[in-house]
Image (cartoon, grey):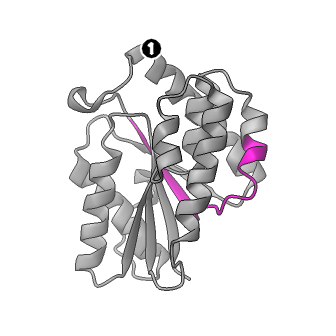
Amino acid sequence: MGLYLGVEGIDGVGKSSVVNLAAEFLEIHGLEVTTVREPSTDIGREALEWDDPYLQALAFTLDRMLTLKRVDFEAADVVLSDRTFLSTLAYQSALGADMRWLLELQRPVPKPDVVYIIDREPLAEDATFDKEFLERVRNRYREAARLIEEEFDVEIKWIEAEDMDKEEIAELIVADARRRLDDPLGIPDDLLEG
């Protein structure tokens, strides 16, 4: 089984672009990459319009389970996910759901080996929520990351990306992934805060 990596962060930080670039860069290096995007099912996409954070969490968790069930983890060197269960903890808790309840809901969900959290202000062209809400979600990511590291065997890597473009972020993820796959590039560990 290869690496299962997740890319996280508030809306508008460039996650989708980073995932696409990282997948492209990894494939250039001869690795078999499967990309996943959440939500990916009708119920997950519909839940984006719902007002109840608990119902959203249930729908997103079902979406995640159905999506990951279709992934052949054995065939890929790297499974790269645009969002993970961490999104449910951060967003739905920012909307009022209890963080511990959300954490328990995620127990049966397959967990990534590493989650990279892109920490930066949203890029203007990508922002879908108001700035105040996104700041609340950003704070919830920090709280959720602490809980996840305590409860699950998931490594969290914060990428302080205020002065980085999407290509630089993708290159950091690729370098770390290759290092983990025993193909070292000599990336300094201090670039990826753990």
Q: Nearer the viewer, residue 9 or 178?
A: 9
Q: Is residue 122 left or right of residue 3?
A: left
Q: Residue at x 35, y 66 (%)?
A: 174
Q: Residue at x 45, y 23 (%)?
A: 134
Q: Is residue 174 left or right of residue 8?
A: left
| Residue 63 visible | yes
The x and y percentages for residue 90 are 58, 34
Q: Nearer the viewer, residue 150 or 11?
A: 11
Q: Residue at x 32, y 50 (%)?
A: 16
Q: The magenta stretch spans which residues?
A: 103-119
The x and y percentages for residue 94 are 59, 24
Residue 170 in magenta stretch: no
Please give the residue where the numbered disc 1 appears in the rendered image.
Answer: 132
Quadrant location of residue 119?
Answer: top left
Quadrant location of residue 164?
Answer: top left
The x and y percentages for residue 39 are 47, 48
Q: Secondary structure at mark 1?
A: helix
Residue 49's place in the image compared with 64, above or below, is: above
Kind of residue at badge 1: Glu
Residue 107 in magenta stretch: yes
